[in-house]
Image (cartoon, grey):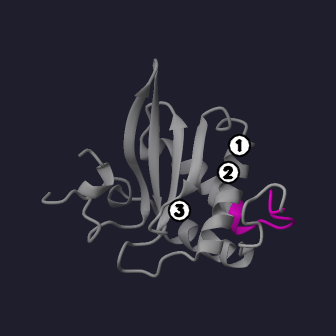
Amino acid sequence: MDVTSFGIDHNRLLRGIYVSRKDTVGNGLLTTFDIRMKEPNREMVIDTAVMHTLEHLMATFFRSHPLWAEKTIYIGPMGCRTGMYAIFKGDLESADVADVMQECYAYMSSFTGELPAAKAEMCGNYLDHNLEITKLESKKFLDEVLSCLKEENMIYPRQNG
């Protein structure tokens, strides 16, 4: 069984940006990133309404970004509710996306106005959002992690390693 995340030592995993996996598709490569906003099993998980709002804002940010829109394959929540996944075209490393993640979390932490696609005809659970807590969580991650990324926030701790 090759499920990368099952080989990660979640007891030592810190908040950060990690390369979760790389997959060859046709002649190209896709890189999946683990954007870990909470320390697993040590911090409270992210509320589902906040996860949903993060998904809407991150998808909007990346799908409209002048450089990253074309590279963005997927943005979505982790089932464990400790962070988000992002899949981009290319053979990328955490350092390659650090600046754009800072931009994204700055965008989310200061977002004002109507939440993108939070309407019944555009979303399957349009009432389940929390913009204010999303802004707080985004600012916390930006200030405490993204603005001062270190190697331990970008390289997975392996089990038995």
Which element type, helix, strand or loop, lies under badge 2? helix
Q: Label 1 is placed on what type of residue?
A: Arg
Span shown in magenta: 107-119
- Residue at the image position 45 percent from the left and 44 percent from the top: 32
Could you tell whether 132 is left or right of 74 in the image? Answer: right
Sequence-wise, the earlier of marks 1 and 3 is 1
Percent x, y for residue 101?
57, 53
The residue singled out by tag 1 in the image is 63
Q: On the image, which quarter does residue 34 sit in?
A: bottom left
Q: Is residue 139 visible?
A: no
Q: Nearer the viewer, residue 40 or 148?
A: 40
Percent x, y for residue 98?
51, 50
Q: On the image, which quarter does residue 54 sit in?
A: bottom right
Sequence-wise, the earlier of marks 2 and 3 is 2
Q: On the image, which quarter does residue 69 sit in?
A: top right
- Residue at the image position 71 percent from the left and 75 percent from the top: 130
How busy is the neighbourhood of tag 1: few (under 14 within 10 Å), some, or many (20 plus)?
Answer: some
Which element type, helix, strand or loop, lies under badge 3? helix
Q: Is residue 69 above or below residue 45?
A: above
The residue singled out by tag 2 in the image is 59
Q: Label 2 is placed on what type of residue?
A: Ala
Which element type, helix, strand or loop, lies under badge 1? helix
Judge depth for marks 2 and 3 and give the one in front.
Answer: 2
In the rendered picture of this protein, how many numbered marks are placed on residues?
A: 3
The residue singled out by tag 3 in the image is 147
Q: Main secondary structure of the magenta part?
A: loop
- Residue at the image position 71 percent from the left and 43 percent from the top: 63
Q: Distance between the Cα atoms at labels 2 and 1?
A: 6 Å
Was residue 58 drawn as part of the magenta stretch in this picture? no
Could you tell whether 16 is left or right of 110 in the image? Answer: left
Could you tell whether 35 is left or right of 54 in the image? Answer: left
Judge depth for marks 1 and 3 and give the one in front.
Answer: 1
